[in-house]
Amino acid sequence: KAGVTQTPRYLIKTRGQQVTLSCSPISGHRSVSWYQQTPGQGLQFLFEYFSETQRNKGNFPGRFSGRQFSNSRSEMNVSTLELGDSALYLCASSLAVRGEGNIQYFGAGTRLSVL
Amino acid sequence: AQKVTQAQTEISVVEKEDVTLDCVYETRDTTYYLFWYKQPPSGELVFLIRRNSFDEQNEISGRYSWNFQKSTSSFNFTITASQVVDSAVYFCALGPQSYNTDKLIFGTGTRLQVFP
């Protein structure tokens, strides 16, 4: 079974641009979550999608947005990039079984550098 | 508030030494889950273990073992006879038993370096 796939792996953008990152979950997984990892703030939760609906959101500005498609694939978008957005963006998927601490399986991430 | 603390920022050991990574958590939830993940240089977070708050039984898996103590809110991880391939950043995480979220609260991680 294929794991979580994130594309692209590396991205270089300049301030003010926007970027879209893609995530394909493990087949059969219905929930997709996004996390931002930086040396200063560590791993922080961005948002989570289930059945094409955002069901939880972290404390990030509105420049960060996402969506989930009917096949569970997800994209996240960051508009008006700032230098501080440079980070490793990790996507995770789970079976989303209700009432359980679902195991999240992570992709290799997209490393975004903003110049 | 929910919080996970990994006080050890970095640990260096020589191969074959045993090493314990500490994790202390805070939550007001009566039911929750605890996780350990490993992040090698490639960047991908690799799932190691999940523990339900009701299950305080310690677990051993090969060279890995976990000690969950609810009374001290700790979930420590021990690697026996460490190997160079164990070098990575290890994260402890707290998750809900929730019907509408899988959100994880991560600790800041412990970087383990195993030297030959």
Image (cartoon, rainbow, N blue to C red):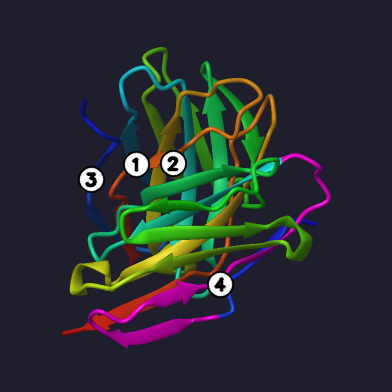
- Verify CB contact (< 8 Å) between mark 3 and mark 1: yes
> Mark 3, chain letter?
A
> Mark 4, chain letter?
B
Rendering coords of residue B4 (x, y %): 65, 63
Q: Is residue B116 above or below residue A40?
A: below
- Verify CB contact (< 8 Å) between mark 1 and mark 4: no
Please tell me how crowded label 3 is: few (under 14), some (14-19), or many (20+) other residues with Cα within 10 Å: some
Q: Do callouts 4 and 3 point to residues on the same chain?
A: no
On the question of residue A17 being in view, the answer is no
**Residue B19 magenta-drawn?**
yes
Corner quadrant of residue B2: bottom right
**What amino acid is labelled 4 in the image?**
Asp
**Residue A12 magenta-drawn?**
no
Whichever of labels 1 and 2 marks the residue nearer the N terminus, that label is 1
Helix or strand or loop: what does disc 3 sit on?
loop
- Verify CB contact (< 8 Å) between mark 1 and mark 2: yes
Q: Do callouts 1 and 4 point to residues on the same chain?
A: no
